[in-house]
Amino acid sequence: MNNGKLLWRQFLMEWTLYSRDRGAMFWTFLFPVLMLLGFGVIFRGGDAPKMPVAWVQPAVMQVKDQAMLDALAQFPSKLEAMTPAEAEAKWQKGETAVQLEPTPDGFHMKVNSYLIAQGQMTAQVVQQAFLMAQAKLGGQPLPKLIPVSVESPGHAHETNYAAFLLPGLLGLNLMSMGLFAVGMVIVSYREKGKFRRLAVTPLPKWVFLLGQIMHRLTVVLLQSAVLILVGALAFHIHNQGSYFLLSLVMALGTACFMALGFALTSFAETSETYGAISNLVFFPLMFLSGVYFTLDAAPKWLQTAVVVLPLSPFLKALRAVFNDGSGLQGQMLGLGIVAAWTLIFFGIAVKRFRWA
Amino acid sequence: MSELALEIKGLRKAFPKVVAVDGLDLEVRKGEVFGLLGPNGAGKTTTLEMVEGLQQPDTGEIRVMGLDWKKHAQEIRTRIGVQLQATSLFNKIKPREALDLIGGYYPKRRGTEELLDLVQLQEKADAYHITLSGGQMQRLALALALVNDPELVFLDEPTTGLDPQARRSLWDVVRRMKAEGRTVVLTTHYMDEAETLCDRLAIIDHGRVIATGTPASLIADLGLPSVVELSFDGEAPDPTPFAARLGFAVEAREDRWEIPAADPKSLLPRLLEAAEATGTIYQQVHIRRATLEDVFLHRTGRSLRD
């Protein structure tokens, strides 16, 4: 047989084997379509998404303020007017990306350090609007920019932006550990029949599962300790809050996402299916958490629904401790949600876990 | 307390493409070594897995030492010992650790050292599981099956893939289990193993029991204690003309003809005459005792190896 024929046969065989792998087919063809449909439905608004800006209403509206509002209306921005108290409450919840506040002789703009990508884009738009407003007023010979400060919801300032990234990294790391690493190991062990030997013994399932979770929990805490240590030594990033509270939040988050991983393993026969299922859970959890961009463009029902998801309150608590050095007083409701999910996931995991 | 170690009635299990167990009935008495003999795919392993609680039967009743899985699962698990067909342990666990770990799950347990001695695994006691040979893994699996000092032991194809010497030493361990008063239920597709090891047997085919009894009684029930074999160089020819001349049933198998006979001595002269008359060129004539293989063949028309 000549090499051309050989190549053709090899190519066809690769397609044949590939088409029999249902997991691969799902990932390549169905999953992207599902994601597109999902986000398309959620974020369809007809126009391009408008950038939300929190507008702190001044006590007395000056000419420059009105000019600014008129200029902003020319840009794809969505102004949400609120009193200083309302603005502060929203800011502290971490739901504001950019806050614009008139000052006696100009404006001040705050960008949320956790939503920096979305915030900086919005900030540029606001700056352009400001230039336009100045041109229109004609009073300024040399156009100026609005002074900008980057702050966390707890008003922590940090010249080192990596400091704001670290807690998010820790949180995301342990969520992916729980969902991917642990779950995948469990499913592949089950696939290979490694639990059958345990299944014929009187070992209670919950002991096995809790033992697994405890082991992974300590692994994650150690791993996080290494990350924090390297962050401190290499980049001078320091935990602003108590290490005890930080460990507490981390442990709760780890338990929650491990239990979720275990619960999901009971819905997958093979590691391919598990890959599909865990990603199907992971991506929406991540995108809908409001952690990377605000959900102002999403429908109201969705904004209400995602409040109960566990990732966002967990990361908020983590960041509040690490970056703002605050206690957990403001985070109790959020942590309660995480704890409730942990119990639900663990219950499902124990109830549905199969050895073989 | 029931006198039966195991009682199965009307057991059935269907998978999407095949009915693995199809109305199986079985009784195993306490203290006996009981064999499930049948070809691959007969339903032996599926049956055993349902008895061990690894799989749910579709219908049917299983009583293990008089206990029901639905009500007494934990008690059954503490009293049985199980060797799975393929015991896949964690790659980097050591035999000593595995025995300690799994032994710890039971209220009553045998010492790790004693078990390592019993299955002659002392020299590999601290090697990673993945580095053990097939025979060593099998012996470890046997030790694990005995770790809780069980009353009833299930061995699924315990000697498959072992060399003759390893098989013999494993048979010794099984005989010792019986001497210690344990009930042993094992599956095998080796008729010699079934004959030498088992007090009683059930022959299984297509998910049903087709015969039960002691090895001797099963062979005696054939009514034909001997088999005369004519072997050929290459494939056996069509035996029809020869059988007509001889007046006996002749079965062609690969490179030989088999003629079950009640009295082979009186058959021999007629056999030679028939071969002469039909011009049959055979290589050897061989008379042997009937075996369980013949029982299976007679009952199913197929060989155990098929």
Image: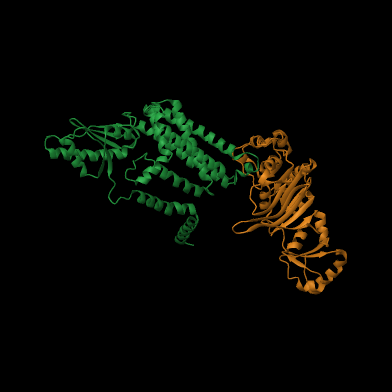
Chain colours: A green, B orange
Total residue callouts = 0
Foreground of the two, A142 or B140: A142
Left or right side of B253 for A177: left
Residue B256 coordinates in the image, percent (x, y):
75, 64
A78, above or below B259, in the image: above
Residue A148: quarter of image: top left
* Residue A178 in view: yes
Residue A319 coordinates in the image, percent (x, y):
39, 32
Left or right side of A75 for B267: right
Residue B303 coordinates in the image, percent (x, y):
72, 60
* Residue B139 in view: no
Foreground of the two, A300 or B175: A300
B139, above or below B226, in the image: above
Q: At 49% from the left edge and 54% from the top edge, which residue is drawn?
A: A22
Q: Residue furthest right?
A: B266
Residue B59 coordinates in the image, percent (x, y):
66, 54
Foreground of the two, A83 or A40: A83
Left or right side of A55 for B260: right
Foreground of the two, B238 or B94: B94
Q: At 64% from the left edge and 41% from the top edge, which residue is drawn?
A: B132
